[in-house]
Image: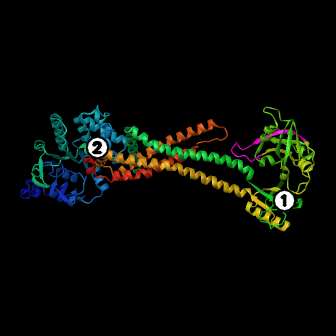
Amino acid sequence: MAKDLLIHPAAAPGERAHAAAPPLIELRDIGRHYRLGDIEVRALDGVSLAIQTGEFVAVIGQSGSGKSTLMNVLGCLDNPSSGQFLIDGQDASHFGPDELAALRRERFGFIFQRYHLLPHLDARGNAALPAVYAGVSAADRSKRAEQLLARLGLGDRLHHKPNELSGGQQQRVSIARSLMNGGQIILADEPTGALDSASGAEMLKLLRELNERGHTIILVTHDHQVAAHARRVIELRDGHVIRDTGTPVDHQVQAQATEAAPLARTSWWRRLQAQWREAFASGVQSLKGNRLRTALSMLGISIGIAAVVSILALTTAVSGSIEKDVSGFMSGRIMVWRGNPNLPPGSQAQAFRPTDLEAIRGLAGVKAVSTEREAQMTARHGARDSMVSVLGAESDTLAMRKLKVDQGRAFLPNDFDAAAQVAMIDEKARDNLFKPGEKVVGRTLLINPMAAPGSDAMTALPMGAPPPLGVAFPVTVVGVLKADTGGIVSFGSWLGQVFVPHTVFSRKLDLRTDADQFNVLLDFTVPPAEVKRHIEYRLRALHGAEDFGVWSAEEEFRKFQQVTGAMALLFAGVGAISLLVGGVGVMNIMLVSVSERTREIGIRMAVGARQRDVRLQFLVEAVLLCCLGGLFGVLLSWLAAQGINAAQKDLRVEVSWAALGVAFAVSSLVGLIFGTLPARRAAALSPVDALARE
């Protein structure tokens, strides 16, 4: 039986000669078991051995003997299922992933059969990789890498990528990498397996030289001729040690080699910077290496960001324009009119007398009270006539109705004082009464209070108005008006409008002193809602009943702002759906990337990367991908805004710097959220499993 052939290392003569020297590595009854379905595989079963500092040990055995599993345990790539694994007397059997990573980083160097170099890094970058995770400054690690590569005959290959190097040269780069952080213990897994005989012999010579310089070499091989170069041979079969020649009697610990001296560590801040730079550089290289996939992933994020930014920019522009237009008409205004549908049958609503208006003017918070008189009449110019709304205008009427002078002039104070028979007409009245291109300013209109023959316009005259005079009276057009709303909102009448001074309206068209409606302008010293309550209370006291209606434009304007804000959020939410889809696409791509780069993750872990280093790398890559997509999305939305602005002049759409900042913030957040799962999956990989995958 294999157990009967076991020679315990304690029985070796060399061991007895060095019993006083504490072993560098000691395994006590180590077991490593796996489950394959219902079958338990004992890759290592009760292995005990001790390795002294500076030994050159070969672990030999056929495939399935457990030698690779033993190497993984010795190199802190895997934890044993049972037993104790001590390094310098420190039990590492139950260390966590980051503690094992620290041991690999500070004590071990690995030389793999397939080199395991990162394809996107040059020779110097591959050699310097372990020092990144050790917190060595960029200058120091580059200098050390150049020195090691030059000593190994690769001084002229510093900037060559792995695919530009021969197999022997790649293996030399892996040796330089193993020595980067000192390489007190060098584990070589079938180092000559992928080399020709000449390169293999050179590799074994290098290993002997490293051993002579004080490095502890553990060579794993199935070739007895390769194992013969070691000074101690440990043979495995079926997870058991069946032969151990023991530590040589003449073994002496050599002085520490120059390259084994650890490099100076920098401050925690510089270590953090180095890790971030490495993560960023790795992310850039990965994205460049898969350009088409990167572009497609960016497209999803770009569409989402472009949708959100464009919708927000468009809704902001529209709502801002509408609010600007509406605010001038609604803000700071309370409208009061005669009549109430809730009056008892037979009750008659009273008109507003001058004393009522004076009482309202005396209320706190009231800036002014303006009456608004309007009637539907017939206007004639030459052979053309048209039904129009004739309004008695005051000095602030144009501003309140969001109108501005397009041709001619507005009313002057003298027009009001002298009750001048002048008029301003809007564009609709101009089109109805004048020929296209015909001069308007200075022409005379005939305003007829009588309704047009055959029409029922008389019913549209103000309630309680005196009988029409029956005589058309002339007015001179002094101005043509147009909407002052950018063409988005219009407060005009469905009829053409003719404005005359309110003094003319009162003397020529409506002789009443009472008013059917009036507007209250606020000074905002009192809240609009409170002013509205005071108006209602005062008018009920004066009329003895609520025979009027009151509408607070200020309150409605605030509601309007809330509605437009809610609509903007709703539309942004619709756009965010596409961003969500893009984020899911990024997560999917990053999961694929983790699957494709499993061996790279294993290499990084083998040279000392902690789980948080791997998480950082993939999170940075996801955020970088999303931020690039966000930048392209902002560019798309800016181009869309320019197209909208070029197609029309009424609405100005702008993509602000704030939108750019929000886009990057949202992109980063999407990268963090949807990159977390792939990053966690990458960090959770076992170094052994990761290195075993292709």
Foreground residue, 385 or 576? Answer: 385
Horizontal side, residue 271 vs residue 402: left or right:
left
- Residue at 92% x, 48% y: name it: 508
Which badge, 2 or 1, is on the more N-terminal residue? Answer: 2
Q: Is residue 359 above or below residue 186?
A: below
For badge 2, the amino acid type reads Met
Give coordinates of residue 623: x percent, y percent.
44, 47
Q: How is the image coloured?
A: rainbow
Foreground residue, 452 or 594? Answer: 452
Callout 1: 10 Å neighbours few (<14), some, many (20+)? some
Residue 483 in the magenta stretch? The answer is yes
Give coordinates of residue 215: x percent, y percent.
20, 46
Horizontal side, residue 474 vs residue 133: left or right:
right
* Inter-mark Cα distance, 2 to 1: 89 Å
- Residue at 16% x, 38% y: name it: 205
Horizontal side, residue 553 vs residue 673: left or right:
right
Give coordinates of residue 611: x percent, y percent.
34, 53
**Residue 361 got which mark?**
1
- Per the image, label 2 sits on a secondary structure element best described as loop
Q: Is residue 649 visible?
A: yes
Q: Of tags 2 and 1, which is closer to the observer?
A: 1
Residue 633 in the magenta stretch? The answer is no
Foreground residue, 313 or 137? Answer: 313
Callout 2: 10 Å neighbours few (<14), some, many (20+)? many
Q: In what quadrant of the picture does the N terminus appear?
A: bottom left
Task: Report the span colored magenta.
Answer: 474-494
User: Residue at the front extreme?
Assistant: 454
For badge 1, the amino acid type reads Arg
Q: In what quadrant of the picture does the C terminus appear?
A: top left
Q: Which residue is mark 2?
A: 180
**Residue 61 got which mark?**
none
